[in-house]
Image (spheres, rainbow, N blue to C red):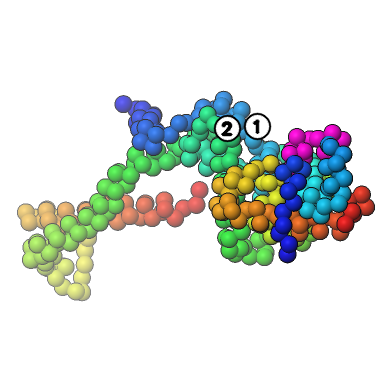
Amino acid sequence: MTWDDIISQAKASATAQTGALLMDEEVFAAFYQRTARPVWAYLARVSGNAALADDLLQESYLRFLCAGRWKNDEDACRRYLFRIATNLMRDHWRRPKTAALEDVPEAALTTDVRSDWDQVDSNALLGAGFAQLSPRERQLLWLAYAEGCTHREIAQIMGLGTTSIRVMLFRARRRLAHLLRQTQTPQWRNK
Amino acid sequence: MNLGFCNKQKEVSAALQEGRWPGACDPALVAHIAQCQDCNDLVLVAETLRQARSQTMRNAELVSSETLWWRHELERRSGVVERVTRPIAFIEKLALIAIPVVMLAVGLWQWNEIAAWFLSSPDLASAGTFRWDSLWTLASGAAAWVPLLLMASLGTFALICGVALFMATSKD
């Protein structure tokens, strides 16, 4: 018995114990092709940091693969992926920032959030208005209107109660609309 | 804050999601949106976020799925290797604790013989002189096996600890 045989047997027994339905590389590649861009857009817009979105995107997919919760229902997998991404963002914000100032590269010391978006959004559609919202409001609005999630799906992704989503969404939407009208072109200034 | 939700919001949401806004929308609905603050907000926010999503997705530069799959397989293999070698690591730690304990026990058990062995050489007994060949004389004695065994074990243990410490602290 070689070392590789032992490892293969251990992998097989671990899979049998968890009862996980694993995906193969082809299925994962197709799933990644369909879902990676929306997830990245969600991470990038809500966090306001494209580099952070790159890291969190990879971490999200790795955790998704490790969880082994692949099902034939792609919508459920997609929602699970968004949930992982949401939790990773939350963990990132909660983590204490202990890096010494000398260790931080100069390019990272910019205070202009929009400068990080020069490569991504030259039109700055959302502008500074979206950045003024709280992280929770940004998540709610993006999931509801950019991704088209229902209130129940948003509640599952964010770990909130379904009944509170409607009110929170209403308030966030009103606030963003007000901020957008302050910066948008006159065609939107109806009220 | 007035939270009276407009009863047309579902209709407006459906029109937005189906892409009927504004060209293929019912004119009455368009007129309503122009008058209703909530529906106007909804259209503004939804359209802006949709456009932002499309633009952001177009500009995304993503890592390949093969890279992620490779990382996943590597982590999975590392996890399996760690689980398989866990009993070996446990035995190693146990041995590192057990060896000095056994040496100490043997040393205490045979303390009289060890002390007598050291003091049997006139050179070692006198504090003023010491010669290396006196150790050779002692080692060839009949009662030398216990102290020799202890010294050899101690030396080997010290060597292994040194190597282990070096490997643990060296940076690759």
Look at the numbered disc 1 and give the secondary structure of its residue: helix
**Residue A122: horizontal and vertical position, in percent?**
84, 46
Foreground residue among A125 and A166:
A166
Subunit of label 1: A
- Relative to A51, B15 lies left or right: right
- Relative to B89, A189 lies left or right: right
**Residue A58: horizontal and vertical position, in percent?**
60, 42
For residue B55, which quarter of the picture? top right
Whether residue A17 is visible, yes or no, is yes
Which residue in the structure is indicated by mark 2? A74
Quarter of the rendering occupied by the N terminus of chain B = bottom right
Stretch of the chain drawn in magenta? B13-24
**Above-or-below relation of B75 to A44:** above
- Residue at 66 percent across and 57 percent down: it is A168
Q: Is residue B15 magenta?
A: yes
**Dots 2 and 1: beta carbons under 8 Å?**
yes
Subunit of label 2: A
Q: Is residue A102 magenta?
A: no
Which residue in the structure is indicated by mark 1? A34
- Residue at 65 percent across and 31 percent down: it is A33
- Residue at 65 percent across and 42 percent down: it is A149
